[in-house]
Amino acid sequence: MAHKSILVVGGGVSGLTAAIEASEAGSEVYLVEQKSYLGGKVAQIYEYFPKLCPPNCGLEINFKRIKQNPKISIFTLSEIEKIEGKEGDFTVTVKTNSSHVNQNCTACGKCAEACPVERANEFNYGLDKTKAIYKAHEFAFPMKYVIDDKVCLGEECGKCVSACQYDAIELDMAPKSISLNVGAIVWATGWEPYEAEKISYYGYGQHQNVITNVIMERLAAPNGPTKGKIVRPSDGKAVESVAFVQCAGSRDENHLAYCSGVCCMASLKQATYVKEQNPNALVSMFYIDVRAMGKHEEFYTKVKENLTIIKGKVGEITVDPLTNDLFVQVENQETGEFMKEKFDMVVLATGMVPATVGIKVPVEITYDEDGFIATDSQQPGIYGAGCVKKPMDVASSVKDATAAALKAIQSTVRR
């Protein structure tokens, strides 16, 4: 039996695009997301390059399209347990973990006010805290609270239950599994930043003022842990000097052998964040090669005028234990000079690792040597989309997801 419905796994920009495009073409779509909200990494970005506009505008448009479309069913806090069958006739088992909050939630926040327990806020990479019952972020969709049952005291506390006037909290809510029959699957689980702790000579996790590019996005965001103020984690001091270290772990046979393509543009964009807040700040960028191809060349040419750009791979980052200032050591490849420069903060441009390195598709498909889903996955009816196929920027991910949606539609009609 052939099924016309499509399963999309991953609620980031690629998954959102695939789900919306397929549904608006007439297919019934099931959208499964592991987190409590849709939007993925894009929801954590402060601004896009090269236009330097906030992503929430684009996300809001997509969320509106979902709200208006009865053909899309959303499953958050969910994961794929099993896939069986073949193109045109897959049976998929989806496990939905409990949020302990039902559809009555109005996101009024009274529950969080009453909650006595705190947890690290993963949306801000642990730089601040939320209550055990929390809203992922202020633009979260679906807009409702969720309980972290790893830290919640449960029935022995229950203060959130008594604070909620809408009977939205169910502390005994249990996980559940459902079975879906679909004709095709789009796998769009996105990417994770390379673990900077593995690059020991850069001191991430040891030196407080060494951060990563994804953390920099949250520091600059008005809804981030510092309300948009770019400050040193060690003392909250506004930064006067920042070093951007490119290819942190990338193009390195001991870490990531490949180039993620977008990191140079991301650092150039983040340099504008610093200059916007402090025009007199010293901003340096250490690079192997600057990748700013096509339409991005103009942005690179414009931004670099306000930066110190040095060709050379940083060898080591050390710290002054009294001031927490950082020293970046590098050989300038153009002059041959060995440099040791002092900075308030260092931003590591870590690469993009496909989520499939950690969580595989639960069926036999083909991956390349770096863990990305191969373009020809040799599994008809299952299609990778976006950054699980290769590193991409947002615009490229949208295009790729649209193509994946078209392939999925074709799988449901040709059987």
Image (cartoon, grey):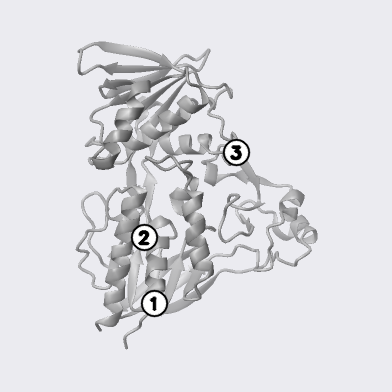
Residue 48 appears at what percent x and percent y?
Answer: 42, 43
Q: Amino acid at mark 3?
A: Asp
Query: Is 112 positioned to the left or the right of 376 in the image?
Result: right
Query: Is 134 positioned to the left or the right of 383 in the image?
Result: right
Residue that numbered label 2 is attached to: 188
Mark 1 is surrounded, within 10 Å at the Cα level, by few (under 14), some (14 to 19) or many (20 or more) other residues, namely many
Closer to us: 412 or 132: 412
Q: Marks 1/3: CA distance?
A: 41 Å
Residue 381 appears at what percent x and percent y?
Answer: 27, 73
Closer to us: 34 or 140: 140
User: Which of the image's four quarters has the N terminus?
Assistant: bottom left
Badge 1 or badge 2: first in the primary sequence: 1
Residue 128: numbered disc: 3
- Pair 3/2: label in front: 2
Q: Residue at x 51, y 38 (%)?
A: 218
Whether residue 387 appears in this view of the structure is: no
